[in-house]
Image: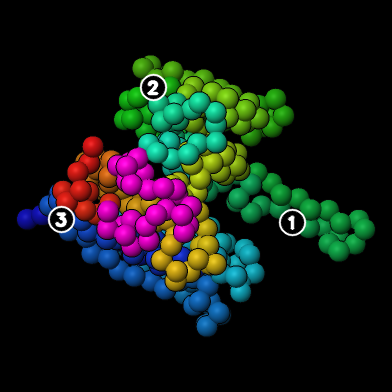
Amino acid sequence: MSKSYDIGVIAGDGTGPEVIRESIKVLKAAAQRFGFSLNFVEYDFGGTRYLKTGEVLPESAVGELRKFKALLLGAIGHPDVKPGILEKGILLRLRFELDMYINLRPVKLFPGVDCPLKDKTPADIDFVVVRENTEGLYAGAGGFFKKGTPDEVAVQESINTRKGVERCIRYAFEYCKKRNIGNKLTLCGKTNVLTYAFDLWERAFYEVAKEYPTIKADYAHVDAITMWFVKNPEWFDVIVTDNMFGDIITDLGAMIQGGMGIAAGGNINPEGTSMFEPIGGSAPKYTGKNIINPLAAICAGGLLLDYLGEAEAGKTIESAVMHITGERLKSLAAGNMGFSTSEVGDMVANCLLGVLHIY
């Protein structure tokens, strides 16, 4: 009997449903090719539901989503909903309550994709950022004193626990070992200024490193990392960092790999439920026009399959996308791809099914 997986789907807002439609199309093609089945269960969480009901997530939602090994998310963000409501109420709540303590962000330049860095090719840009996803400044510790007065004070605290830091670092070492490309793990921090938080990070990093003698462990300040991403991205293999720095450097990573239209990531609980998503926003101005680029959502589906243990299927999705960017698309920009959203999804699916040859 073939394996079967239940996948929770939150298509979300704006163009989210359009890109998720294509991601599911490709996932079904991968399942057909590799002999497993996928059962998709859809949820309407997002801005439209919130405007209609005043409810971001019902009380039963987290418990229900916890039953899935993997979730596929389209986009969260509605022009008629104040920023922060949906992001905190859906994205951050799921990350924290489902303990998705790893944010995994591959940064890879695909063939045919324009890179803003002079003379850099796909051989130069292929690294992964492992970001701690449930602590740091995002833990929400802090508050106001005398708010709204001339003496107002705002405090935002970065919470870093030994458990949280070490499990993130250990995941990064294991991922680097499994990836087996550069066998180099870089800790990104700011030990010269953030002398408490990154003292903990650095001590834990080098203690865990002793268990991985085949992995080269090194350190770089976050400001140096941003410079070297631009100047020498080929230096990097796997990078591990805290929540805030990870949030910043992964957006820079997305730009050097060609933009948000190709960037995908995962919010991972290795022992529980994980959620995979395109990095770009909901792009409401393109909603319903069938011109948005779905490749980031399709790549997110590839990461999802790898997480489920269907590594060959996930890698084949990536290969199919690389063929499409290298041989078919004029651009990754919405409306300038040379094909519609659904046509791009069809091409990737056809690559998987052998209708289009993958070079």
Q: How crowded is mark 1: few (under 14 residues within 10 Å), some or many (20 or more)?
A: few
Looking at the rendered image, the disc whose residue lies closer to the viewer, 2 or 1, is: 2
The amino acid pointed to by label 2 is Gly
Whether residue 168 sits left or right of residue 321 in the image: it is: right
Tell me if I can see residue 183 in this picture.
yes
Image quarter where the N terminus lies is bottom left
Q: From the viewer's side, name the closer residue of 146 and 313.
A: 313
- Cα–Cα gap, marks 3 and 2: 33 Å
The residue beneath circle 2 is: 182
Q: Name the residue under label 1.
A: 143
The span from disc 1 to disc 3 (Cα, nearest Å) is 52 Å
Under mark 1, the amino acid is Gly
Question: Can the viewer see residue 271?
Answer: no
Residue under label 3, please give it.
32
Callout 3 environment at 10 Å: few (<14), some (14 to 19), or many (20+)?
A: some
The span picked out in magenta is 322-347
What amino acid type is highlighted by mark number 3?
Gln
Q: Is mark 3 on a helix, strand or loop?
A: helix
Viewport quadrant of the C terminus: top left
Q: Does the magenta stretch include residue 340?
A: yes
10 Å crowding of disc 2: few (<14), some (14-19), many (20+): some
Q: Is 130 inside the magenta-drawn segment?
A: no
Percent position of residue 61, x then y: 42, 70
Between residues 80 and 341, which one lies in front from this camera angle?
341
Q: Is mark 1 on a helix, strand or loop?
A: strand
Looking at the image, the residue that sits furthest to the right is 150
Which label's residue is closer to the chain start, 2 or 1?
Answer: 1
Q: Position of residue 117 (x, y in %)?
A: 55, 31
Q: Which residue lies furthest to the left in this view?
A: 1
In the image, residue 286 lies at what x, y percent? 50, 66
Q: Relative to residue 128, is residue 51 depicted above or below?
A: below
